Amino acid sequence: MKDRFNFNRDDVFNNLTRERLTELESVPRTGLRLVCDYLICLMPVLAGCMALAEYILIPNLRDNTSTQVYIYFIAALTAAAVIFFITAFKSRKTFYILRYKAPFYALVFILLAVYDYLTLKTGILVLPYFPWCDQILNAIIDDHAYLLDCAGNSILLLFSGYFYGAVLGLITGTACGCSRTADYWISPFMKLLGAIPSPTWIPVVMVIASSLFAGSVFIIALGVWYAMTIATMTGIRNIDRYFYDAAKTLGASRIQLVFHVALPFAVPNILQGLTQGMSSACMALITAEMVGVESGLGWYISWQKSWAQYGKMYAAIVLLCVIFVSVNWGLNRIKRYMLRWQERVSAFDYGAV
Amino acid sequence: MNILELLHVHKSFAGAHDVTQALYDISFTLRDGEFLSIVGPSGCGKSTILRLIAGLIVPTAGKLLLNGEPITGTNPERGMVFQRAALFPWLTVEQNLTFSARMMKRNINDKEYRDEAERLLETAGLKEFRNDFPYQLSGGMAQRLALIRTMINHPKVFLLDEPLGALDAFTRMNMQDELLKMRQRFNHMMLMVTHDIDEAIYLGTRVIVMTPRPGRIRADLNINMPFPRVRTSSEFMQRRREILELLDFGA
């Protein structure tokens, strides 16, 4: 560890990693700064222990009850932070990731502790509107079979609608972008349908559709379709004439111009459309479930609310967040892979605040 | 022996309110091994001639013939390199190089084709960068890739639309020598549009001087100096003066 900043030339120029490069070009981290860095990396662990201590040591307000579940939950998260901290000693890359993320992780623990203090310990935020984390966790565990079922239904509905909408949007968008005739016939309908928020159709669709499921799929697909069509079309229209000229002189046919030039060029926009479509799909899903469909997390939320079961309601909300966050995370991974041909410039790299 | 003929070609473009005449009565004949430089001020329709030969646009009147056949549409046998490299940013260096073969459904794992691709990558100095994306290349590297991407098809007619315009002076001089080597190797006909008179004389076996509005041929000069040419020789200077006078920039 000690000779990290003393190097010999060959070592530097042969096995240069991204992290090592950053290290060499920045101000050397020595003595106090290095200690500070490791302290910052340790912050999530400390914050985790603090959250545990807060829960165990401070007495509950009057007849507020609590269980062991929250302790296990925080302990598990803290253990993860400990493992992360230990691996940071072994791997340079992990060290830099943790050094970057640690303050935020610590904040999460602190927020959990503060929320717990405001609800369970002092009752400043009152029941039934603000159940403490332990109650929410217990609600998830108690009702887990039914919640999973609802989550499954929501995911199925979401992705069915999303899939149809995305595929159709890609097709109409490509057609409108590449063919004047298609643009002539499709664009007016799109302008008409796109101006109306898709949940507006719920009352009509629920009556006409053969099943509630099919109706909801249609509502969700409509929003996605619109976002995807616009995005694909814009992407294709922005293409530089040079690309078509070059491809043509290299022997590309008209169909090949669409699939090998127009569509690849539009990929950044298409991905943008997919992300936008996802957010509109999520909105339509929840609306559809709260209004008509009798399953899924959205329905579960409004059902539990009507029984004033706020703990269970929050449990479903937490689950919804987890689903939406992981879907977006997946989309981002796809985006990063698909757009590896684009130069990534971040304002942070240039010292922008 | 390939022969390219332009017979009384006229070309007009429709603007928003009026029609502008870009080319007026252009005729010339070109054979294998010739390097034709086209010089002239901007707006004289130099690039339009190349785009007509490439088949990207159609003439308003007149004929374009390659080996007696009229030119219709684009074809890899008439390869073109553009002022901007126009590399496909989503493809790697190697995928850009083999783009044309994939479009024409040619087997890119074929031994002969592979060898040619390797050799071209080598001469362009892009061997180590084969898996890089265009944004990672320097201007000179990108333009070299654009050149070999067209060259790999062994076009009968090689059209160069100011391909060196955006390069710095040193890269530019190196690339000029590359073009000469290429001409020696394939002996196909080359047409290059440029607004650099030195470049036109250094490379061309023939120089066409054009005047604008509408674009027409002012003079068609043969340059009979042996290669490699010396940019500072008195003959070079004399030809330079001659062309400048034709463009009304004489002393």
Image: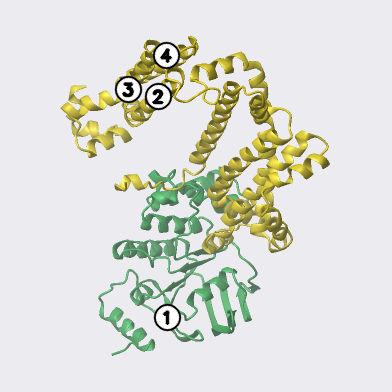
Chain colours: A yellow, B green
Residue linked to disc 2: A114
Badge 4 marks a residue whose secondary structure is helix
What is the spatial separation of the Cα atoms under label 3 and label 4, in whole angstroms?
20 Å
Question: Three-letter amino acid code at disc 3?
Answer: Ala
Q: Residue at x 54, y 65 (%)?
A: B156
Badge 1 marks a residue whose secondary structure is loop
Q: Is residue A197 left or right of residue A16?
A: right
Residue linked to disc 1: B40
Q: Position of residue B192 (x, y in %)?
A: 45, 71
Give the mark nearest the N terminus, 4 or 2.
Answer: 4
> Which chain is disc 1 placed on?
B
Q: Is residue A92 above or below residue B213?
A: above
Q: Which mark is residue A88?
A: 3
> Which chain is disc 4 placed on?
A
> Which chain is disc 2 placed on?
A
Q: Are marks 1 and 3 on the same chain?
A: no
Q: Residues within 10 Å of mark 4 (few under 14, many from 20)?
A: some
Depth check: give the residue in front, A118 or A264.
A118
Depth check: give the residue in front, A183 or A223.
A223
Q: Is residue A272 above or below residue A29?
A: below
Give the mark nearest the N terminus, 3 or 2.
Answer: 3
Question: Three-letter amino acid code at disc 4?
Answer: Ala
Q: Are marks 4 and 2 on the same chain?
A: yes
Question: Is label 3 or label 4 in front?
Answer: 4
Question: Is label 1 or label 2 in front?
Answer: 2
